Image (cartoon, helix red, strand yellow):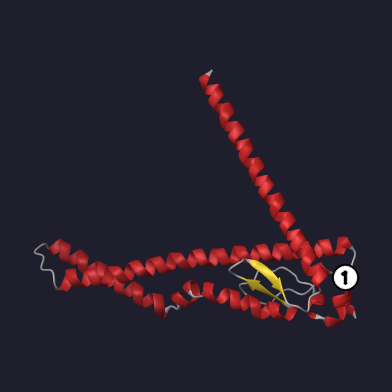
């Protein structure tokens, strides 16, 4: 009974390393509490919607950060793999009479091969590249107990059928309202920046 009476802010945190530390309501995981969502006051649901939206935004931010980091390491790995055959050709096939050129060619080949070996021996590939592909499945394994999952393609939290339809629709409306206001604020900032630019341009003409 004490666990059910805890509010949204006091709920347990998702125990996954790559998931942002945002609390979720235990009521989503308790069928006995499903009726509470339809009977909750709008202010209580508003706080739940806000916390869920913050959680959703941080999931998207973490996923994008991991993907960007993964792309950087993949690009570096691809460049290194492309460079090694060229250096092998230069060192063992191409006959150069320049000793300095030969020395640096061998040095770069040694560095490239060592880097490639260290990339896999130090488990950098699994930690930096594959972690982005494991992020969403890890999230969904934890979110399943709260009757929801994270849709990576849409970047949204999706509820299971056990969650009351009224609560789902309320969260959808809250999400749409948030992004509408966010878009309006962005347009207002752009207009203000344009106005400032026009004022500066007029000042220069004076």
**Residue 39 location (% of width, % of height):** 91, 70
Q: Residue at x 43, y 78 (%)?
A: 122
Give the SS element for disc 1: helix
**Residue 206 location (% of width, % of height):** 54, 17
**Residue 151 location (% of width, % of height):** 63, 71
Q: Residues within 10 Å of mark 1 (few under 14, many from 20)?
A: some
Write down the residue under mark 1.
Answer: 38
Along the viewing direction, whichever of 73 and 104 lies nearer the viewer: 73
Q: Residue at x 55, y 23 (%)?
A: 202
Q: Which residue, as the protein is rendered here, is positioned at the far left?
A: 97
Identify whether 59 is placed above or below 149.
above
Identify whether 202 is placed above or below 182.
above
Place residue 124 in its image quadrant. bottom left
Q: Which residue, as the protein is rendered here, is positioned at the far top?
A: 206
Along the viewing direction, whichever of 68 and 117 lies nearer the viewer: 68
The image quadrant where one finds the N terminus is bottom right
Relative to residue 75, is residue 182 drawn left or right?
right
Q: Residue at x 49, y 65 (%)?
A: 69
Along the viewing direction, whichever of 173 and 41 lies nearer the viewer: 173
Place residue 104 in its image quadrant. bottom left
Number of marks present in the image shown: 1
Q: Residue at x 76, y 71 (%)?
A: 24
Place residue 192 in its image quadrant. top right
């Amino acid at each position: 009974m004490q666990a059910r009476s805890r509010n949204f802010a006091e709920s347990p945190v998702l125990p996954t390393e790559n998931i942002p530390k945002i609390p979720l309501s235990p009521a989503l995981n308790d069928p006995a509490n499903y009726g509470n969502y339809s009977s909750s006051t709008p202010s209580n649901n508003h706080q739940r919607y806000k916390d869920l939206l913050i959680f959703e935004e941080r999931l998207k931010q973490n996923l994008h950060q991991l993907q960007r980091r993964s792309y950087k390491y993949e690009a570096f790995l691809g460049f290194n793999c492309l460079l090694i055959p060229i250096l092998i050709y230069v060192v063992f096939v191409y006959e150069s009479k320049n000793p300095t050129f030969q020395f640096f060619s061998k040095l770069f080949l040694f560095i490239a091969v060592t880097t490639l070996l260290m990339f896999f021996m130090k488990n950098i590939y699994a930690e930096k590249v594959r972690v982005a592909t494991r992020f969403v499945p890890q999230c969904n394994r934890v979110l399943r107990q709260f009757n929801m999952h994270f849709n990576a393609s849409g970047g949204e939290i999706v509820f299971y059928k056990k969650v009351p339809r009224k609560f789902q629709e309320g969260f959808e409306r809250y999400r749409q309202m948030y992004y509408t206001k966010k878009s309006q604020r962005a347009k207002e900032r752009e207009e203000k920046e344009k106005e400032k630019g026009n004022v500066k341009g007029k000042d220069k003409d004076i």
